[in-house]
Image: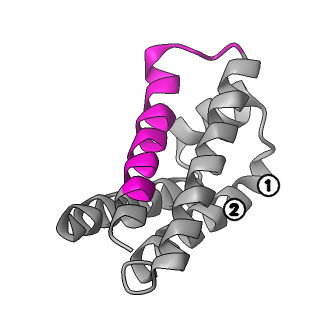
Amino acid sequence: MFIAAVVVSVGLAIALTGSAYLKLVKDPQIIKGIVETVGVPEERLWMLAVLELAGAVGLLIGLAWAPLGIAAAIGVILYFIGALIGHVRAHDTGPGSITPPAVILLVAVAALVLRVATS
């Protein structure tokens, strides 16, 4: 089961890193979805990117030290619950906008369950 925890954690860390990168380079699709639709100020995108990178690093280091992996997974879960709440409050609930954070949230829950089960 630890192999599953590694695969899910590494995959999630890659997804978080990619998402953070898109925020840092201010990808037009990110600007449209997060800034214009949800209402996050553009000058704060870097904060969201830092949180995602912290989650990615925590998940990877957490493979060696379970408490950090568990804490990182919980942090990622809370982050993406917040993302979903932001989309719902902005009435931006189409499949193209709400599916990515929902999928990442479910993967983060899987990472948490697997890390707890293997610690």
Residue type at the position of mark 2: Trp
Which residue is painted at 44% across and 83% down in the image? 61
- Residue 15 visible: no
Q: Which mark is residue 43?
A: 1
Q: Is residue 78 left or right of residue 111?
A: right
In the image, residue 96 lies in the stretch drawn in magenta: yes
**Which segment did they paint magenta?**
91-113
Which residue is label 2 attached to?
Answer: 46
Q: Nearer the viewer, residue 74 or 14?
A: 74
Instruction: Compute the Cα span from label 1 to label 2.
Output: 7 Å
Dominant SS in magenta: helix
Quadrant of the drawing holding the N terminus: bottom left
Pointers 1 and 2 in contact (C-beta within 8 Å): yes
Query: Which quadrant would the C terminus be assigned to in this image?
Result: bottom left
- Is residue 35 positioned above or below 59 on the image? above
User: At label 1, which amino acid type do we have?
Assistant: Glu
Q: Which mark is residue 5?
A: none
Q: Residue at x 51, y 13 (%)?
A: 94
Instruction: Provide the secondary structure element on which disc 1 rests.
Output: helix
